[in-house]
Image: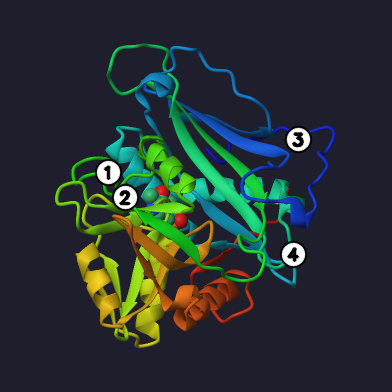
Amino acid sequence: MLQSLKIELIKTKKQKPAADQLGFGNHFTDHMFIMDYSVDNGWHNSRIMPYQPIVLDPAAKVFHYGQTIFEGLKAYKTDDGRILLFRPQKNIQRMNRSNERLSVPELDVELTIDVLKQLIAVDQDWIPTAPGTSLYIRPFVIATQPALGVAPSTHYQFIIIMSPVGAYYTEGVNPVKIFVESEYVRSVKGGVGEAKTAGNYAAGLKAQEIAKEKGYSQVLWLDGVHRKYIEEVGSMNVFFKINGTVHTPMLNGSILDGVTRNSIIQLLKHWNIPIEERPITIEELYEASRKGELEEAFGTGTAAVISPIGELNWQEEKLIINGGLTGELSKKLYDTLTGIQMGKVHDPFGWMVEASIVHA
Ligand SMILES: *Cc1c(COP(=O)(O)O)cnc(C)c1O
């Protein structure tokens, strides 16, 4: 597909937002990538074109049956002008696992990364450079066949859009308050909780809205069967430091296999800090807190990287963690991971991939 990549450039460039006006996912770069799929032709017609609305038939299957998947990753510009991607293979491999679960045709991992580099090269002026800023990349696939029969679509579009995003926190890492959800559930084993698909988010909006009204920024999901095992937070995996050991829910078929989660586990192992992946109950956290053993809690995800948790509320019982302040380990993980991503801290894992390419 790469050989036949068509590139149509914009005529007038958009005004770029100021670094302090970015927010998250509010502004989009000048170009986007699109590729089509049909059962007869496979993936074909790959093109980079000016960012613009797409036209779909109202019967397109994505609107009715939610056959769609997405990814989220970031590109960074270093002080010496290099463009770096953080573990892009991981995202594209996960995209294929989501594709497989949603009966969407697979994408070629290496060719997809090549296309991504080409798109970034075209819009490289859009990568912000202020501390904490980056270019967020959103690849996604939608089912486009206009037909209401419930069956996998015969036609798809794979699209990549990009958004310059700001520092998630204005002053380093600040703790968030999290509401432990007891009524609604996000997913169960055997469902689509492991896939990055729109429906998981649609299903969580109601609980998130209620938590917001109560003054909590996100929801911590419990398992859908026993309603006692910790799953994950909104769009983040979670970690708890109890008595010197870090604990995180094991990948159990209903939570997302986060790239940040995986990286944090590797970093902790590298530092010889004990890390356990296992089932964790919510009672256990409250018990550890009563004994004074719950030292830190934090969420991990591409958007915020590390998000310390200062308070949990489960069935109206509040639990304050580390006095509501950012813990030492959370801060160290945030500084190290963002340092590696910005090319400022040595990357012993070979995570960063140079995206700068010579553009013909
Ligand atoms: C994307 C996502 C995460 C975080 O994954 P990263 O790869 O670290 O960004 C966690 N949970 C859910 C539900 C997600 O969609």
Q: Is residue 283 left or right of residue 324?
A: left
Which of labels 3 and 1 is toward the front? Answer: 1
Q: CA distance from mark 2 to mark 3?
A: 47 Å
Quadrant of the image where one finds ligand 1: bottom left
Q: Could you tell me the amino acid type at mark 1?
A: Val
Give above or below for 326 relative to 114.
below
**Which circle marks residue 9 in the picture?**
3
Residue 171 appears left or right of 299: right
Residue 78 x %, y %: 69, 69
Q: Which of label 4 and label 3 is nearer to you?
A: 4
Q: Which mark's residue is nearer the viewer, 4 or 2?
A: 2
Q: Quadrant of residue 15?
A: top right
Of the residues tagged 1 and 4, which is closer to the observer? 1
* Residue 80 seen in render: yes
Mark 4: which amino acid? Ala
Residue 327 position in % (x across, y down): 47, 79
Q: Which residue is mark 4?
A: 130
Q: Which tag is nearer the camera, tag 1 or tag 2?
A: 2
Amino acid under disc 2 = Glu
Please tell me in which quadrant of the rendered image residue 349 appears: bottom left
The residue identified by callout 2 is 181
**SS at badge 4:** loop
Q: Closer to the camera: disc 2 or disc 3?
A: 2
